[in-house]
């Protein structure tokens, strides 16, 4: 989502650069532009990194090296994470550190671990937290916004910051307000006051992680708010900033950007965006959504990430082009460097494309990043891109001031090629000689160059990685291999929060749905499912069966639960999910078989008999045009299915907010027969013939 913004063009002094002759000045004697705040990426919004914990340690380390390790891959300088809120925020739900007002747990989810891994590789990386959703109790009676009691919301967010330090030794550098939703001025002021009172003066506020809109005017009209806000963060600005935003005097950030498919056109989008966000919009930080596609295909925004790692069952991953486009800037700069002035190292080329020049704080090192991305090869998912042309051109950089004594520059180049031709991505070329203070280049369309005095730069790699394989045909899960409060890595919760809990004998570890009331949602209430919902498996599964043991909580329990097969979707549109859904209502002693999650397409209803007081075993199978189900090994139904999805995920969940436990899940092909019996001694995968 984005809001188109009317932008007034800036007027910059070009000085003695002469683009008509292909001459461009790089000169620090005319002063500097703004301070560089870094290039980053987002884990979250939502559950985008879900499968990373499931990779073997060796491959986790490799993935994190490509993301965070300096002088190796993307070398990210900012890591922005979702503060989980127990509600859907794009591809899934991230767990809150406080499901309830009386409950605090700083080991839920995986964002703590990702921040620790980032810091392990780069102690200088900046950490940034932002809520997408909030637990229902924070809404203080409202599921539409968290502003009913600003102090309640402030305390909730500040506890997350304090928990990061107390339990994980992580210092949070930046905190946002509410992702792409209306901000609240009293809340922002109170947040600043509370942070200061609790010795968190180092935590700086980014507002409002939406669109330019009202936040700019609010800052201009309210000096107290202006004092509270350190950075103005906007989303998908299309490289443009309104004049009023510049007039605030604040550093301007594209605090969420890119969001495009990570092929070479997506790489071109990111290359153009990184440069033009400053050339056109004076934005000093650009943060990509998202860091990694760590979620199932085809959940929304699949592969709109810097890299892809969503195959924990076989440990394979892909280092996509945007990783190396990021490296063109991050491997040769650091936060705190300064941009040169427009016309003296920053600007557009007459033949299309752009250049930015950054200088180290001591003035001794220079990095120039050049991009000549053509329109059709750099279109981002959003916002729309107006037509423009790029042509082959010869350019001359004239080095003046401190830089006139530079004799050579190191060169890294990416050359995109299309139509089946191989691209050259982040390749080191021979150093270029500076002759008579001049550097000459022939630029072709769809190229990215880095010219730098820095000796750094490395296209990191590992010898090999596993081959891709299908999700296991047969999957048994008893949750015994997981730590307390963790999430099984193959499960993709779409609403609510499902955690591994130890319950004692005989079941020991179980998967428990934890959320007791409807959260304050990020997704639209009209499209988001309003009860807990989880997915697992392979979207391409067709004839499949699932069996589970399930019980409702004695206190704060849900009124029912469901299992499902052939589930066709998740994300913010999960309320319209179709498939085969078997709802069980033990206290009412009846079941419902539905063709959709909302029970608007009822296939049949029936009686259960007498359920057990605790655990009950439920199975559901879809094979061809028929469904079969059992309850405690007694047949419930054999029925012909109406027309619906032919394939999809396995699903499970509850029919209302409340506690429910799930255990001993077995997924297998509908026609599978295991004559040797099925082992139940751990989290195991089985394929036919093994």
Image: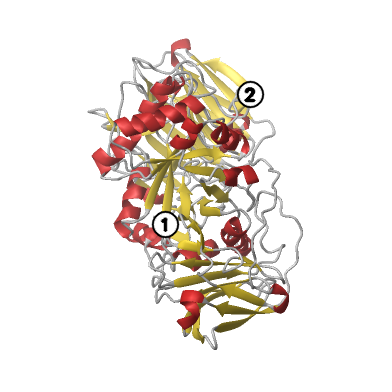
The residue lying at 54 percent from left, 62 percent from top is 322
Up/down of 331 relative to 509, above or below: below
Residues at marks 2 and 1 touching, judged by CB atoms closer than 8 Å? no
User: Is 481 placed left or right of 131 in the picture?
Assistant: left
The residue lying at 58 percent from left, 47 percent from top is 246
Name of the residue lying farthest toward the left? 505
Identify the residue under disc 2: 603
Question: Around disc 1, counting alpha carbons within 10 Å, would you say few (fewer than 14), some (14 to 19), or many (20 or more)?
Answer: many
Comparing 322 with 245, the one in front is: 245
Comparing 111 with 24, the one in front is: 24
Q: Can residue 295 be spotted in the picture?
A: yes
Up/down of 603 relative to 567, above or below: above
Residue 612: image x %, image y %? 36, 17
The residue lying at 31 percent from left, 21 percent from top is 102
Comparing 608 with 15, the one in front is: 15
Element type at mark 2? strand
Residue 553: image x %, image y %? 36, 19
Residue 267: image x %, image y %? 59, 62
Identify the residue under disc 1: 77
Question: Around disc 2, counting alpha carbons within 10 Å, would you say few (fewer than 14), some (14 to 19), or many (20 or more)?
Answer: some
Earlier-in-chain disc, 2 versus 1: 1
Tag nearer the camera, 2 or 1: 1
User: Is 405 placed left or right of 487 in the picture?
Assistant: right
Comparing 187 with 91, the one in front is: 187
Residue 618: image x %, image y %? 44, 27
């Amino acid at each position: 989502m984005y809001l188109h913004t009317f932008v007034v063009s800036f007027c910059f002094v070009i000085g003695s650069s002469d683009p008509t002759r292909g001459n461009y000045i790089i000169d620090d004697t005319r002063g500097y532009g703004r301070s560089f705040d870094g290039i980053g990426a987002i884990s979250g919004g939502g559950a985008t990194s879900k499968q990373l914990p499931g990779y073997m340690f060796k491959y986790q380390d490799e993935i994190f090296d490509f993301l965070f390790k300096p002088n190796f891959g993307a070398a990210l300088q900012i890591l922005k994470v979702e503060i989980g809120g127990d509600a859907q925020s794009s591809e899934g739900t991230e767990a809150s550190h406080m499901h309830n007002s009386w409950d605090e747990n700083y080991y839920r989810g995986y964002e703590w671990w990702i921040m620790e891994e980032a810091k392990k590789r780069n102690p200088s990386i900046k950490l940034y937290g932002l809520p997408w959703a909030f637990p229902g109790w924070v809404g203080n009676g409202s599921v539409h916004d968290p502003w009913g009691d600003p102090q309640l919301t402030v305390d909730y967010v500040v506890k997350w910051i304090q928990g990061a330090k107390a339990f994980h030794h992580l210092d949070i550098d930046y905190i946002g307000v509410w992702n792409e939703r209306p901000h609240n001025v009293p809340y922002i002021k109170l947040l600043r006051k509370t942070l200061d009172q609790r010795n968190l003066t180092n935590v700086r506020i980014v507002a409002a992680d939406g669109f330019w809109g009202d936040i700019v005017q609010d800052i201009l009209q309210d000096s107290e708010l202006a004092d509270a806000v350190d950075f103005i963060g906007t989303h998908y600005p299309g490289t443009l900033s309104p004049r009023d935003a510049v007039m605030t005097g604040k550093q301007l950030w594209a605090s969420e950007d890119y969001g495009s498919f990570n092929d070479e056109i997506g790489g071109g989008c990111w290359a153009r965006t990184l440069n033009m966000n400053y050339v056109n919009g004076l934005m000093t930080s650009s943060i990509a959504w998202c860091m990694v596609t760590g979620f199932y295909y085809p959940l929304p925004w699949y592969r709109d990430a810097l890299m892809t790692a969503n195959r924990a069952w076989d440990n394979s991953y892909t280092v996509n082009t945007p990783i190396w486009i990021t490296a063109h800037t991050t491997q040769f700069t650091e936060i705190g460097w300064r941009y040169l002035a427009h016309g003296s190292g920053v600007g557009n080329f007459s033949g299309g494309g752009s250049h930015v020049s950054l200088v180290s704080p001591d003035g001794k090192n220079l990095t120039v990043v050049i991009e000549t991305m053509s329109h059709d090869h750099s279109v981002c998912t959003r916002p729309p891109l107006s037509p423009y042309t790029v042509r082959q051109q010869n350019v001359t950089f004239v080095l003046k001031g401190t830089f006139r004594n530079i004799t050579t520059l190191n060169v890294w180049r990416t050359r995109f090629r299309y139509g089946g031709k191989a691209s050259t991505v982040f390749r080191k070329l021979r150093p270029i000689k500076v002759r008579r203070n001049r550097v000459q280049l022939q630029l072709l369309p769809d190229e990215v160059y880095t010219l730098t005095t820095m000796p750094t730069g490395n296209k990191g790699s590992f010898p090999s990685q596993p081959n891709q394989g299908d999700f296991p045909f047969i999957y048994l899960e008893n949750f015994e291999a997981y730590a307390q409060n963790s999430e099984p890595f193959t499960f993709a919760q779409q609403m609510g929060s499902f955690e591994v809990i130890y319950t004692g004998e005989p079941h020991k570890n179980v998967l428990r749905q934890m959320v007791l009331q409807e959260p304050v949602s990020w997704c639209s209430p009209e499209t988001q499912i309003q009860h807990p919902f989880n997915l697992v498996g392979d979207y391409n599964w067709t004839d499949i069966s699932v069996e589970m043991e399930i019980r409702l909580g004695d206190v704060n329990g849900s009124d029912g639960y469901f299992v499902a097969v052939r589930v066709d979707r998740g994300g913010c549109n999960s309320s319209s999910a179709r498939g085969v859904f078997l709802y069980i209502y033990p206290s009412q002693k009846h079941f419902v078989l539905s063709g959709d999650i909302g029970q608007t397409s009822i296939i049949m209803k029936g009686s259960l008999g007498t359920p057990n007081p605790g655990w009950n075993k439920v199975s559901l199978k879809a094979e061809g045009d028929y469904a079969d189900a059992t309850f405690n090994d007694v047949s419930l139904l054999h029925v012909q299915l109406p027309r619906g999805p032919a394939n999809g995920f396995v699903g499970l969940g509850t029919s209302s907010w409340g506690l429910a436990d799930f255990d001993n899940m077995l997924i297998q092909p509908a026609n599978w027969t295991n004559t040797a019996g099925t082992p139940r001694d751990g989290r195991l995968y089985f394929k036919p013939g093994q």
